[in-house]
Image (cartoon, rainbow, N blue to C red):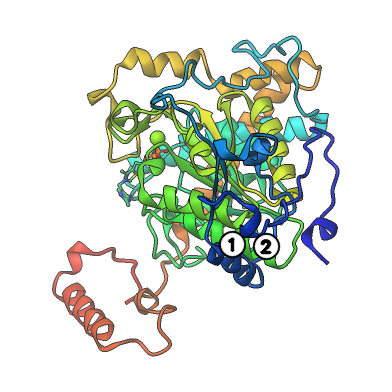
Amino acid sequence: MGLSTAINRSSCWSSLTRHKKPPLTSPSTQNPRGPAQNFCDREALFSSYCFESVKAEKESNSLNDVDHSQVLDFPGGKVAFTTEMRFISESPAERAHCYQVLDNDGQLIICSKFKEVSEEIAVKMYSDMVTLQTMDAVFYEAQRQGRISFYATTIGEEAINIASAAALTIDDLVFPQYREPGVLLWRGFTLQEFANQCFGNKADKGKGRQMPIHYGSNKHNYFTVAATIATQLPHAVGAAYSLKMDRRNACVITYFGDGGSSEGDFHAALNFAAVREVPVIFFCRNNGWAISTPTSDQFRSDGVVVRGLGYGIRSIRVDGNDALAIYSAVHAAREMAISEQRPVLIEALTYRVGHHSTSDDSTKYRPVDEIEWWRLARDPVARFRKWIERNGWWCSEAEIELRDSVRKQLLHAIQVAEKVEKSPLAELFMDVYDVPPSNLCEQEKLLRETIRRHPQDYPSDLPV
Ligand SMILES: Cc1ncc(C[n+]2csc(CCOP(=O)(O)OP(=O)(O)O)c2C)c(N)n1
Ligand SMILES: [Mg+2]
């Protein structure tokens, strides 16, 4: 049974037709300048090892009716000849448009097409966005007070975090960068679990071995954040391929920044995903900055969305501060990724309103006016609130109660996390090797000696 029969789901969204792979023509019937026999044999050989795509859409075959002498029958598809020497332009006639549903004032744009959201989901989306905002404020402050070593906020990207998570199911695997804790929050990771990780205590699932904000949770299908930019992208593609092999009704989503798209791993991942036709959503948070590097120093293309075409991946650009647009786009992308077994690229245009992290002062390299405009005029949380208020699903009393309650819960969580002891020092060297190699044993010995000699440089509550 092929995937086409195993996964046959209808979408309430689109009427995307599924194309069958055209039968391979024998070389004798092809243009004499055409492909060598061995390419056909290679396809036959490898098809037994890889999993066929449901759609295998080959747009290149629009040339079927053309005079064969005008067409090069090249491995991978037919190409028309031309006598014109025309270079393909480096920039499109117009920039890719940005899909939007709610305007800056939270009004539904007339004629906008979007996926309906129930009151229950909309209120949870809003509440989680507020929780994320409050979590950022409390943890940022805790770092400034010297209680945790590091923090990075998600300010300005709350809608990306929460609305994308809301459009997925818990079976969909998440490969995050680091500015998407809201996805984990949506899935039920508790405020206490966030606090335990940031304080690096014994209750942290990573045993305090990672920097703050490097969350991860098996239970929530959320792979642990790795600080190495973009390494999550090829991992996501591999995981999506495994979902395809297991014929699972799930996809992978991987998040990355505009900076992530400047890494080689981005290109390798997109190409692999396209060629292997795997159910993965590449979600780019284009927030204008990679620490102090603006996007103008990163690429000359029309952002990231246009790269999809280069790799043969369907793509969309969305307003990253519009929760309804994000929810709708991710919902549609998920449908396509699973039912058609294909990757989809989403570029969300947004802005990193906070500093890159607590190790950064962004006013040194960008105008304060620019930050303030995004913080106030384009706040995704306020925009969504206006929409749910207009629907009669939210009011000022609920707002005060929510903010007050979340703040109290967070303050309690950090007080508890602070009191929990740290993992024993020995844990730092465990869980990688079955038998630790000699250099690791040497390092442990050295660390213990150093702590003994310089106790003032190490936390007094560290169980050695
Ligand atoms: C491979 C690698 N190179 C460089 C860094 C240093 N670094 C950490 S975050 C970052 C910027 C990433 O920017 P972006 O992907 O746009 O994400 P954003 O912080 O804007 O959300 C850089 C260069 C790193 N962590 N890993
Ligand atoms: Mg960025």
Screen quadrant of the N terminus: bottom right
Residue at the far left in the pictured view:
453
Instruction: Give the percent coordinates (x, y) of residue 431.
Output: 44, 78
- The reply to whether residue 221 is visible in this rendering is no
Q: Residue at x 48, y 53 (%)?
A: 269
| Residue type at tag 2 | Leu
Q: Nearer the viewer, residue 341 or 369?
A: 341
Q: Residue at x 74, y 9 (%)?
A: 110
Q: Find disc 1 in the rendering and name its residue.
A: 239
Instruction: Give the percent coordinates (x, y) of residue 187.
Output: 67, 49
Instruction: Give the percent coordinates (x, y) of residue 386.
Output: 68, 15
Secondary structure, mark 2, is helix
Look at the picture and state if 365 lies above or below 308.
above
Look at the picture and state if 47 lies above or below 319.
below
Q: Is mark 1 within 8 Å of ligand 1?
A: no
Q: Find disc 2 in the rendering and name its residue.
A: 243
Q: Residue at x 42, y 29 (%)?
A: 352
Instruction: Give the image quarter of residue 97.
Output: top right
Look at the picture and state if 103 lies above or below 29.
above
Which quadrant of the picture is home to ligand 2? top left
Image mark count? 2
Query: Residue 418: which disc?
Result: none
Left-right relation of 389 to 318: right
Left-right relation of 291 to 4: left
| Residue type at tag 1 | Ala
Q: Are marks 2 and 1 in contact (CB under 8 Å)?
A: yes
Q: Residues within 10 Å of mark 2 (few under 14, many from 20)?
A: many
Mark 2 vs mark 1, CA separation in Å? 6 Å
